[in-house]
Image: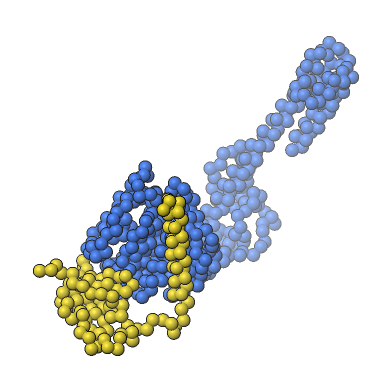
């Protein structure tokens, strides 16, 4: 560092000397030497044979000093990099030693009657023998590695802090957040719930608010529910507490399967018969098990359908209701579902999912058209999606 | 009717439907306990017991049952009285006895083809 400062100071003096000599011959040349890089070479040539203003030796000295400064800077940069590498290696060794101590419960320091802090050591505090670390030795790195390999210094330089064992985390600190904590941290949105990447928005009705997918994932994790890749939001009535035993919410799911071809509204009895026969793939959220009947038969509107299924989940002693509404788009289907509602609540849950389906609007060019489009075609018709028959 | 007027009318109808749904939801969520619909047994007309049971003739037959909420249930009619009807619903893996309150039934019709 001192060498660097000395070189810089000498460089400054030589530079001033050059400008002064050139200035005496020509003020313009002096100014140009100050502001135009390498103009000193022109001034040197112009006054080469003028003994009063000759600057050839000054320029030579200037370049030598400049190279010296660059060399010192380059060397310093290498040392900094090597020091950083050595520090990392020392910290890795220290962490390894801590891990092995925790595993074998044998601490050479404690065996020797000494104590040490659990914090990683600084460069100058590596005070125990360590095996050679894979460090690229460049300047300071070699020194740091040598220091790391050196025997322990005199006890006077060692820390005399009492040994503070790592505090074991309390069960509540290691446990995942509870449902109540997750709900407290969640952001309930009102107004318009937009999914611009999918090309639609939901104008949330006045008494409803929505939770976006990231909050939904956290809630599902805290409730040990499996993650649903189709799920993009939950919509909840403001009077419903999600941690209450009788809580219900509308799941908003997106099926990017493509354009659903229009089909004539199928006969409800036939749809029920086909759905009860099973064998198809259920794309929609639901309680599973068997379909007992339709608490509200499917109703088909332009680009929309809504219905309520009464299902007997596998192993359950009582039936539950699954309420669905679908809103078709050009590139897929938005699904609104209430799963596992109590029997008798079909009017409420059907009105909720239907209201949200009606409150959904697609962006221009993403809205549904019964005419065939250039969008990919979904592998099912609307009736097949409703009945889960394909 | 010109197309813009037709679209306007459809939009108005959709908005009115949405408002109806919203009002219905609030009504259902906040209805007082006293305003809850009475049990089916209490809503039966007083002269009902004296009338013949319309489901009696269909006992043992496959029937289609419509509910007052627009629901559909299909099965074999196993029992029918003034309070409820019971269907045997055959599902792929099991058969289920399912009871519907009489007050919620809008109609029962035979599902068997006419001879």
Q: Residue at x 24, y 65 (%)?
A: A269
Locate the N terminus of chain A and report the quarter of the image it occupies: top right
Residue A294 visible here: yes
Q: Position of residue A339 (x, y in %)?
A: 37, 67
Q: Residue at x 54, y 68 (%)?
A: A184
Q: Position of residue B70 (x, y in %)?
A: 32, 70
**Rendered view: A379 above or below B39:** above
Colour given to chain A in the rendered image: blue
Residue furthest out toward the left: B115
Q: Residue at x 58, y 47 (%)?
A: A88
Q: Is residue A206 left or right of residue A2?
A: left
Q: Quadrant of residue A7?
A: top right
Locate the C terminus of chain A and report the quarter of the image it occupies: bottom left
Q: Position of residue B19 (x, y in %)?
A: 47, 66
Residue furthest out toward the front: B1
Q: Is residue A64 left or right of residue A363?
A: right
| Colour scheme shown | by chain
> Which chain corresponds to the colour yellow?
B
Q: Nearer the viewer, residue A269 or A131?
A: A269
Q: How many marks?
A: 0
**Rendered view: A335 above or below A373:** below
Q: Quadrant of residue B77?
A: bottom left
Residue A275 visible here: no
Q: Residue at x 61, y 65 (%)?
A: A164
Q: Position of residue A45 (x, y in %)?
A: 79, 14
Q: Quadrant of residue A56?
A: top right
Q: Nearer the viewer, residue A221 or A331?
A: A331
């Amino acid at each position: 560092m001192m060498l660097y400062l000395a070189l810089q100071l000498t460089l400054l003096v030589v530079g001033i000397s050059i400008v002064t000599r050139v200035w005496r011959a020509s003020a313009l040349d002096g100014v140009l030497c100050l502001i135009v890089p390498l103009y000193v070479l022109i001034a040197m040539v112009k006054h080469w044979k003028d003994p009063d203003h000759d600057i050839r030796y000054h320029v030579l000295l200037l370049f030598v000093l400049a190279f010296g400064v660059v060399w010192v800077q380059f060397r310093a940069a290498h040392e900094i990099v090597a020091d950083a590498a050595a520090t990392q290696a020392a910290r890795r060794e220290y962490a390894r030693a801590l891990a092995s101590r925790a595993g074998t419960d044998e601490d050479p320091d404690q065996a020797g009657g000494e104590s040490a802090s659990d914090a990683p050591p600084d460069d100058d505090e590596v005070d125990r023998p360590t095996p050679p670390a894979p460090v690229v030795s460049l300047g300071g790195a070699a020194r740091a590695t040598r220091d790391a390999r050196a025997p322990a210094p005199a006890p006077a330089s060692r820390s005399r802090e009492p040994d503070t064992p790592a505090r074991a985390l309390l069960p509540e600190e290691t446990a995942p957040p509870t449902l109540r904590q997750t709900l407290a941290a969640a952001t309930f949105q009102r107004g318009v719930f937009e999914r611009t990447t999918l090309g639609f928005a939901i104008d949330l009705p006045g008494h409803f608010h929505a939770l976006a997918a990231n909050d939904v994932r956290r809630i599902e994790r805290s409730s040990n529910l499996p993650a649903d890749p189709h799920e993009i939001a939950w919509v909840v009535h403001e009077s419903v507490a999600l941690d209450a035993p009788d809580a219900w919410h509308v799941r908003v799911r997106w099926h990017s399967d493509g354009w659903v071809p229009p089909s004539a509204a199928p006969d409800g009895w036939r749809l029920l018969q086909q759905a009860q026969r099973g064998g198809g793939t259920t794309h929609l959220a639901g309680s599973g098990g068997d379909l007992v009947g339709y608490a509200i038969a499917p109703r088909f509107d332009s680009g929309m359908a809504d219905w309520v299924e009464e299902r007997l989940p596998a192993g359950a002693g009582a039936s539950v209701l699954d309420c669905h509404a679908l809103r078709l788009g050009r590139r897929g289907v938005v699904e609104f579902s209430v799963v596992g509602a109590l029997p008798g609540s079909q009017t409420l849950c059907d009105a909720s999912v239907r209201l949200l389906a009606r409150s959904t609007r697609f962006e221009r060019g993403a809205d549904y058209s019964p005419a065939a489009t250039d969008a990919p075609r979904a592998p099912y018709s609307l009736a097949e999606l409703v009945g889960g028959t394909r | 009717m010109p197309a813009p007027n037709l679209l306007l009318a459809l939009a108005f109808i959709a908005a009115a439907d949405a408002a109806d749904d919203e009002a219905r939801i609030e009504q259902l969520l906040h209805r007082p306990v006293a305003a809850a619909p009475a049990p089916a047994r209490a809503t039966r007309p007083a002269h009902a017991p004296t009338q013949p049971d319309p489901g009696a003739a269909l006992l043992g037959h496959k029937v289609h049952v419509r509910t007052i909420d627009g629901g559909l249930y299909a099965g074999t009619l196993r029992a029918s009285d003034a309070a409820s009807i019971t269907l045997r619903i055959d599902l792929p893996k099991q058969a289920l006895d399912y009871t519907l309150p009489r007050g919620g039934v809008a109609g029962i019709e035979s599902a068997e083809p006419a001879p």
